[in-house]
Amino acid sequence: MTTSQRTGTILAAIGGGMLLARAFRAGKAIDFAGMTIVITGGSRGLGLVIARELASEGAHMVLMARDAEELERARADIESRGGDASAFVCDIRNRDDVNHTIERIVGHFGSIDVLINDAGIIQAGPLSHMAVADFEDAMATHFWGPLFTILAVLPYMRQGGARRIVNISSIGGRIAVPHMLPYSASKFALTGLSEGLHVELAREGIRVTTVSPGLMRTGSTYNARFRGGIAASSPGFTWQIRFPLCRLTPRERRIRSSRRADTGMPSSPSHFSRGSPCS
């Protein structure tokens, strides 16, 4: 066999393997009908889009967020589309609040099949304009909050159900982003927690998936906290928000990545999308 023939055989084998892997994943699509799915940050942005999509597939969505009015609008929005949703006001930065809310949810629905940690905040600006409180708030929202919800649901997930946990991190949790250090550092922490749990909990049959999206048109920049002047700290950030080719809609992102949870594997670099971190 010539070198070119050997090369062709190897490439054909690789291509065949990729097709088989894709077919295998497609054959394991999750049926969300009848599942109770809890999502933090589900009142707006990516969280609301995810909730709409899963509700359309027959899941009962349980939305958790701090703002009661936003939660009620989100719940009504999902139900107006024919979905099933409930809303629970909860500050995930407060462990007692999280434990109490999860107890209420389980008491009402009997179990939790899937937990999606999506709550997030964005602070943009140079380090010289950041306070320690900005880092503490980012860590409380992106790291401690997900940890608190995971610890709260684990005893119930160990009893049965679909037993899936999805943590929405960011490309900013893989690649450090200047002028977004509280956000990026806290997303790095979430990525480390999520991928460590993926290994530890697999032996118990609990699947943990890490999602690291790039920039999306979620409206999150309207809720971002800018330091040091918007013009000085965010020209590239704002430019990418306005340039359509730099980001996807949340629904486009969700469609591309939602079924990756079928394998139970954390997202690999090939699953990332280009753009600034803004999940």
Image (cartoon, rainbow, N blue to C red):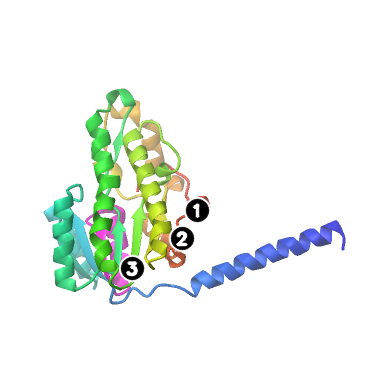
Q: Which of marks 2 and 1 is in front?
A: 2
Nearer the observer, 41 or 235: 41
Disc 3 to disc 2: CB gap under 8 Å? no
What's the amino acid at mark 3? Arg
Q: Which residue is labeled 1 in the image?
A: 268
Is 96 displayed left or right of 211 in the figure?
left
55 in magenta: yes
Secondary structure category for the residue under label 1: loop
Residue 95 as seen in the image, left or right of residue 118: left
Give residue 68's position: percent from left, percent from top: 12, 55
Residue at 35% from the left image edge and 34% from the top image edge: 181
* Helix, strand or loop for disc 2: loop
Farthest residue, direction top: 128
Q: Mark 3 points at which residue?
A: 163
Magenta-drawn segment: 36-58
Q: In which quarter of the image is residue 151?
A: bottom left
Contact? badges 2 and 1 (CB < 8 Å): yes
Gap in Å between the C-alphas at discs 3 and 2? 14 Å
